[in-house]
């Protein structure tokens, strides 16, 4: 069964350092989402792509976060510089145009900023 | 803005008990509603969905009915099993699935044998 892949699964970094996360959606899925999930909370949308275009990045802290999906397939989310409050699970999800209601989530990247 | 409120956990039940997890929402227009489940050590999975008022979503013995008049989407199961132990998230899509989801905080369900 096709899955959303994310790497790394775990990342520990010091504050003020740069960190990057990678996501490979299910093949053929045009829509890709990045969510942030703080421990004990539900996921919150950071950015949504349709193919290579950003559809919604209204909740992305653009002073330190950036996201790209250059060829409309895999995507990278970057934080620079990382802050203590960025410690969270970063989830990637994808969906197809035919079945937009069904978002498939990857296993996430657990970020700890020290 | 859009928001989802669900009952706080943990909810602890005995095996074969009846389960209800309450979920209410605030949204403009006519959102689509979802329940996602996160089993220990696994990623979020779609459990069920309802895209319009009075629709009933069902899967794996779980059910939820989209009640527009009470803005609710409560999750129910008649007889829970130990394997149902997980965190359950209620969520909405304001644009028919074309947007990112707005999630509740999650309810941790613990089923004891």
Image (spheres, helix red, strand yellow):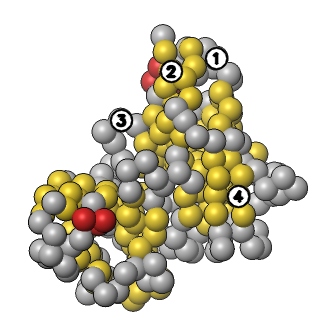
Please tell me whether mark 2 sits on a helix, a strand or a loop: strand
For residue B111, the mark is 2
For residue A70, the mark is none
The CA span between labels 3 and 2 is 13 Å
Residue occupying image coordinates x 55% and y 74%: B99
Name the mark nearer the viewer: 3 or 4: 4
Query: Going from the N terminus, do you reach mark 2 or mark 1 first?
Result: 1
State whether residue A60 appears in this view.
yes
* Residue A24 screen position, x and y as percent: 26, 67
Query: Label 1: which residue?
Result: B17
Query: Going from the N terminus, do you reach mark 2 or mark 4 first?
Result: 4
State whether residue A29 appears in this view.
no
Query: Going from the N terminus, do you reach mark 3 or mark 4 first?
Result: 4
**Which class describes the residues within 10 Å of circle 4: few (<14), some (14-19), or many (20+)?**
many
**Which class describes the residues within 10 Å of circle 3: few (<14), some (14-19), or many (20+)?**
few
Query: Label 4: which residue?
Result: B25
* Residue A58 screen position, x and y as percent: 48, 83
Q: Label 3 lies in what chain?
A: B
Query: Going from the N terminus, do you reach mark 1 or mark 3 first?
Result: 1
Position above or below: A33 against B70: below
> Image quarter for residue B47?
top right
Q: Nearer the viewer, residue B78 or A110?
A: A110
* Residue A83 located left or right of residue B58: left
Query: Going from the N terminus, do you reach mark 1 or mark 4 first?
Result: 1
Please tell me whether mark 3 sits on a helix, a strand or a loop: loop
Residue occupying image coordinates x 77% and y 73%: B29
């Amino acid at each position: 069964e096709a899955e959303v892949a994310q790497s790394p699964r775990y990342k520990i970094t010091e504050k003020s350092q740069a960190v990057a996360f990678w996501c490979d959606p299910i093949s053929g899925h045009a829509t890709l989402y990045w969510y942030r999930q703080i421990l004990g909370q539900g996921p919150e949308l950071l950015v949504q792509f349709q193919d290579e275009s950003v559809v919604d990045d209204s909740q992305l802290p653009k002073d330190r976060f950036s996201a790209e999906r250059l060829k409309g397939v895999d995507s990278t989310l970057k934080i620079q510089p990382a802050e203590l409050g960025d410690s969270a699970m970063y989830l990637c999800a994808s969906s197809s145009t035919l079945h937009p209601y069904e978002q498939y989530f990857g296993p996430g990247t657990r970020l700890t900023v020290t | 803005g859009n928001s989802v409120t669900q009952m706080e956990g943990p909810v602890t039940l005995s095996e074969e008990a009846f389960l209800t997890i309450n979920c209410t929402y605030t949204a403009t227009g006519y959102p689509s509603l979802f329940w996602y489940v996160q089993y220990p050590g696994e990623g979020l999975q779609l459990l069920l969905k309802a895209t319009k008022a009075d629709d009933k979503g069902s899967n794996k013995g779980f059910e939820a009915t989209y009640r527009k008049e009470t803005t609710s989407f409560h999750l129910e199961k008649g007889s829970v099993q130990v394997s149902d132990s997980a965190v359950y998230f209620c969520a909405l899509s304001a644009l028919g699935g074309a947007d990112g989801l707005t999630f509740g905080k999650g309810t941790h369900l613990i089923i004891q044998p």
